[in-house]
Amino acid sequence: MDRNEILKLLEKEEGNKLEFKERFNDSILKTISAFANTHGGLIIVGVNNKKEIVGIDTNDKNY
């Protein structure tokens, strides 16, 4: 997944196929289980509740 694909996903709302998580923790395990028991989904780690990318320098041209 490249930068543009991630930025497009950030424009969407979380739902039964998309979740944003700031960091890997126990809540991700619940989401993985829920997605596995339905029709799958996508978890983007490194995005906070305000849909801000955290943990990487977004000004870096290599990101």
Image (tube, rainbow, N blue to C red):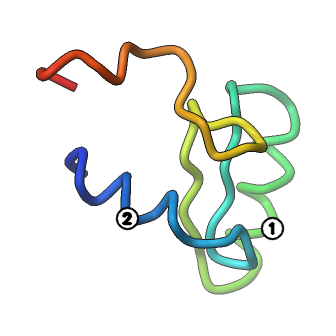
Residue appearing at x 69%, y 25% in the figure: 23
Residue appearing at x 81%, y 67% in the figure: 34
Q: Would residue 40 be found to the left or right of residue 24 on screen?
A: left
Examine the rendered structure and indicate whether residue 20 appears above or below residue 15.
Answer: above
**Residue lying farthest bottom?**
39
Contact between marks 1 and 2 (CB within 8 A): the answer is: no
Examine the rendered structure and indicate whether residue 52 appears above or below residue 30.
Answer: above
Q: Secondary structure at mark 1?
A: helix
| CA separation in Å, label 1 and label 2 | 23 Å
Q: Would residue 47 be found to the left or right of residue 31 on screen?
A: left
Amino acid at pointer 2 = Lys
Q: Determine crowd level at label 2: few under 14, some 14-19, many 20+ residues with C-alpha closer than 10 A.
A: few
Disc on the earlier residue, 1 or 2: 2
Q: Would residue 7 be found to the left or right of residue 22 on screen?
A: left
Residue 12 coordinates in the image, percent (x, y)? 56, 72
**Which quadrant of the view contains residue 48?**
top right
**Residue lying farthest left?**
62
Residue 21 coordinates in the image, percent (x, y)? 70, 40
Residue 19 coordinates in the image, percent (x, y)? 68, 58
Residue appearing at x 45%, y 63% in the figure: 9
Instruction: Say which quadrant the C terminus sits in.
Output: top left
Q: Secondary structure at mark 2?
A: helix
Amino acid at pointer 1 = Ala
Which residue is under mark 2?
A: 8
Which residue is under mark 1?
A: 34
